[in-house]
Amino acid sequence: MMGKMSAHQMEKMMRTMGIKSETLDVKEVLFRFEDRELIVRNPVVQKVNIPGQGESFQVIGTSEEVVTNTGPSEEDVQLVVEKTGCTKEEAESALSVNGDIAGAIISLSEKS
């Protein structure tokens, strides 16, 4: 069983195994989900490079949740308008109801 290990001992052991770590000077980390965002301001971010596995990041800090209005993008609305000849408002409504471009186009095409 291992006893308590100091940060220096841990770092030495990681170097021996070829694991490199670096503390990054990061101001903010944003996690973007489908319906919300988590923002971590002034986090402690550690970049760890493990041979054969690539880089990973550890983020430590307090987050704040931001619920975003994830309405359809302007590009999606424009595409639906171009494909169906509907108004911008009709395209936005169809995208909100159907949840995707294909569904919106199909539902609007069936109405014509």
Image (cartoon, rainbow, N blue to C red):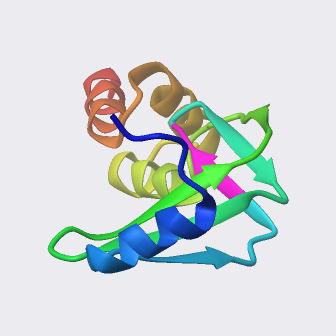
Q: Position of residue 96 (x, y in %)?
A: 52, 26
**Based on the displayed image, in which of its 4 quarters is residue 46 positioned?**
bottom right
Image quarter where the C terminus lies is top left
Report whether 107 appears left or right of 44. Answer: left
Q: Against 106, is 3 above or below? A: below
Using the image as rendered, state which of residue 101 and residue 7 is in the foreground: 7
Q: Position of residue 60 (x, y in %)?
A: 68, 48
Q: From the image, give the main secondary structure of the stretch colored magenta.
A: strand
Q: Position of residue 71 (x, y in %)?
A: 62, 37
Image quarter where the N terminus lies is top left
Using the image as rendered, state which of residue 21 and residue 77 is in the foreground: 21
Q: Against 51, is 70 above or below? A: above
In the image, what residue occupies the spot 51% across and 35% down? 34
In the image, what residue occupies the spot 41% across and 28% down? 99
Using the image as rendered, state which of residue 29 and residue 85 is in the foreground: 29
Using the image as rendered, state which of residue 72 and residue 85 is in the foreground: 72
Name, please, the residue furthest toward the left: 52
In the image, what residue occupies the spot 49% across and 62% down? 10
Q: Against 23, is 61 above or below? A: above
The residue range painted magenta reads 29-33
Circle count? 0
Whether the magenta-drawn stretch holds residue 37 is answered as: no
Report whether 30 appears left or right of 47. Answer: right
Q: Position of residue 13 (x, y in %)?
A: 38, 68
**Based on the displayed image, in which of its 4 quarters is residue 30 positioned?**
bottom right
